[in-house]
Image (cartoon, rainbow, N blue to C red):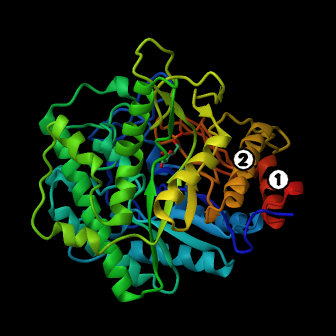
């Protein structure tokens, strides 16, 4: 007996800047990710430009998908994947972001990738922008603050959506667009050089911003909303069967206590950080509750007339979000804090944590799936989920990762519950299905995959691939469509 629908998209996910490598090959230009050095749990990543030969830049080689995509896609097929979420690196198509013509070598590379996927009947789900803005757009235009980026992005999205027509049906406009509501998103996501330099990935690492700086972030976000909406419209005008979705970062939290102040804080934060962007993508307008937030924080968004109509005309077809953990919210400052890359806040006394201090909360995925579905009533995909952990490659080439199997099992069970609740969940693409570098720390040590990549933080390794125990386990789950006995 399974709770999952017949055509459920069992999948896996990666992003170019963390997986692809080949950072200066095939005519690709540098991206904002290419100037970030590796860090670890104690040392934040640094923005270092020009390239320092004594530093490791994780995106430069990453897991070397650029040279090994055939081997990797074959492994994905063996695993039985029905969907593969990946991103196109914009700078591989338009090396400077503002070029007149696309880079043919870049177009050819992704065509080969998509054809290879088609060979195995694996449906691609393609993110157009996953923390990999062409660096020139950050340096020359100050990133997404500048409205010119809307046209550059739409020219890029139109190029690839039309180029790969017949090969790619499902698209996501921006990865974790709501990360721009946080100071961390200023560089990673929006490429705003005038306010952020990409260092650090936690609230404690960021100095308090002035209202002018925060206004820049929210103006950048507004421009991304417009770029997304224009892309949706362009794609639908071109072929109404194309499915364009949004991707929301799981900034998922609970109130720490039933104190009414904690409840109000919880409601406010969920609105402002989790649902705000999803509301704009799905309803085509800014939600009422942001008015007060903008006013109280002196946020002024630069808009022009006609923007409202553009947003209305570009609502997405489906919803996706990443989900790793939950935090707790309280007005009391004197509490233990939890760790994460997007989820912060107070520790939940009922949850265990990963080796990186992220709280593990399988039941939360059911709760938030219901919350998203209740609001938007559109098909949902969990576009990222997984456990970042340290794995050991044994001498016999085996990797025993029962902790990862346990994590995935519990989350899949709760997704099944959500389906029984009535949520239209159509897919699950767990993160870093083949090991990739971490975004927040830049480490290779932190692994999510069911396939081990023999690569290490100091840049050494054969880059050979090894199946972990979780590979066989997940393959069996897929084969039996998530039946209770396969879990
Ligand atoms: C998501 C990002 O927020 O979290 C990914 O979309 C990222 O790019 C993932 O890799 C896991 O975070 P981390 O920091 O462990 O790599």
Q: Quadrant of residue 214?
A: top left
Mark linked to residue 123: none
Image position, residue 242 (x, y; %): 46, 81
Marks 2 and 1, how far apart at CA:
10 Å
Query: Could one spot residue 63 in this view of the protein?
Result: no
Quadrant of the snapshot with the N terminus:
bottom right
Image coordinates of residue 237 in percent, x first then y, are 34, 87
Q: Are marks 2 and 1 in contact (CB under 8 Å)?
A: yes
Q: Mark 2 vs ligand 1: CB under 8 Å?
A: no
> Which residue corresponds to the image point at 47% horizontal and 23% vertical from the top-left?
259
238 vs 79, left or right, is: left
Q: Nearer the viewer, residue 43 or 355?
A: 355
Is residue 179 placed above or below 96 in the rendered structure? Answer: above
Q: Residue under label 2, please give it.
A: 408
Crowding at dot 1, Cα within 10 Å, few <14 / some 14-19 / many 20+, comes out as some
Q: Which mark is first along the chain, 1 or 2?
A: 2
Q: Which residue is mark 1?
A: 473
At 23% from the left edge and 26% from the top edge, which residue is drawn?
208
- Camera-side residue of 390 and 277: 277
Horizontal side, residue 417 vs residue 209: left or right: right
Q: Secondary structure at mark 2?
A: helix
* Residue drawn at x 40%, y 15% as measured from the top left: 333
The one of 359 and 418 positioned closer to us in this rendering: 418
Q: Nearer the viewer, mark 2 or mark 1?
A: 2
Q: Nearer the viewer, residue 181 or 155?
A: 181
* Res. 402 in view: yes
Q: Residue 197: percent from the left, percent from the top?
A: 26, 37
Vertical position of residue 324 compared to residue 105: above or below: above
Q: Give the secondary structure at mark 1.
A: helix
Query: Which residue corresponds to the image point at 62% horizontal and 75% vertical from the top-left?
Result: 117
Give the vertical position of 343 relative to 86 (above or below): above
């Amino acid at each position: 007996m399974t709770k999952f629908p017949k055509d459920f998209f069992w999948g896996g996910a990666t992003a170019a800047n963390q997986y692809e490598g080949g950072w200066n090959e095939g005519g690709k230009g540098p991206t904002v990710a290419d100037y970030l050095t590796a860090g670890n749990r104690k040392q934040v990543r640094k923005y270092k430009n020009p390239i320092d030969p004594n530093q490791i830049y994780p995106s430069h080689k990453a897991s070397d998908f650029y040279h090994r995509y055939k081997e990797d896609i074959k492994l994905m097929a063996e695993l039985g994947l029905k969907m593969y979420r990946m991103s196109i690196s914009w700078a591989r198509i338009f090396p400077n972001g503002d070029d007149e013509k696309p880079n043919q070598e870049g177009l050819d590379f992704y065509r080969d990738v998509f054809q290879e996927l088609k060979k195995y009947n694996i449906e691609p789900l393609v993110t157009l922008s996953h923390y990999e803005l062409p660096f020139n757009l950050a340096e020359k235009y100050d990133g997404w603050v500048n409205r010119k980026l809307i046209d550059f992005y739409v020219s890029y999205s139109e190029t690839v959506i039309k180029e790969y027509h017949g090969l790619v049906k499902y698209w996501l406009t921006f990865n974790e667009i709501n990360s721009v509501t946080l100071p961390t998103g200023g560089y990673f996501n929006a490429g705003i050089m005038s306010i952020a330099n990409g260092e650090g990935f936690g609230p404690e690492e960021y100095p308090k911003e002035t209202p002018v700086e925060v206004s820049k972030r929210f103006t950048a976000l507004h421009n991304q909303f417009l770029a997304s909406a224009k892309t949706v419209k362009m794609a639908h005008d071109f072929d109404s069967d194309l499915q364009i979705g949004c991707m929301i970062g799981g900034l998922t939290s609970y109130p720490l206590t039933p104190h009414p102040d904690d409840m109000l804080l919880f409601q406010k934060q969920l609105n402002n950080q989790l649902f705000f962007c999803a509301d704009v993508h799905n309803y085509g307008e800014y939600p009422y509750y942001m008015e007060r937030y903008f006013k109280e924080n002196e946020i002024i968004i630069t808009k022009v007339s006609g923007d409202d109509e553009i947003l209305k005309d570009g609502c997405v077809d489906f919803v996706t979000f990443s989900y790793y953990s939950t935090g707790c919210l309280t007005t009391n400052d004197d509490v233990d804090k939890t760790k994460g890359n997007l989820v912060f806040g107070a520790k939940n006394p009922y949850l265990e944590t990963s080796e990186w201090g992220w709280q593990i909360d399988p039941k939360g995925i059911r709760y938030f799936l219901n919350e998203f579905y209740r609001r938007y009533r559109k098909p949902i995909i969990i576009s990222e989920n997984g456990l970042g952990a340290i794995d050991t490659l044994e001498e016999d080439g085996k990797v025993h990762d029962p902790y990862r199997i346990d994590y995935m099992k519990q989350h899949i069970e709760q997704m099944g519950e959500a389906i029984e609740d009535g949520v239209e969940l159509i897919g699950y693409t767990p993160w870093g299905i083949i090991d990739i570098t971490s975004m927040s720390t830049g480490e290779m040590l932190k692994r999510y995959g069911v396939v081990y990549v023999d690569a290490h933080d100091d840049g050494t390794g054969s880059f050979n691939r090894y199946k972990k125990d979780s590979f066989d386990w997940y393959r069996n789950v897929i084969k039996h469509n998530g039946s209770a006995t396969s879990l």
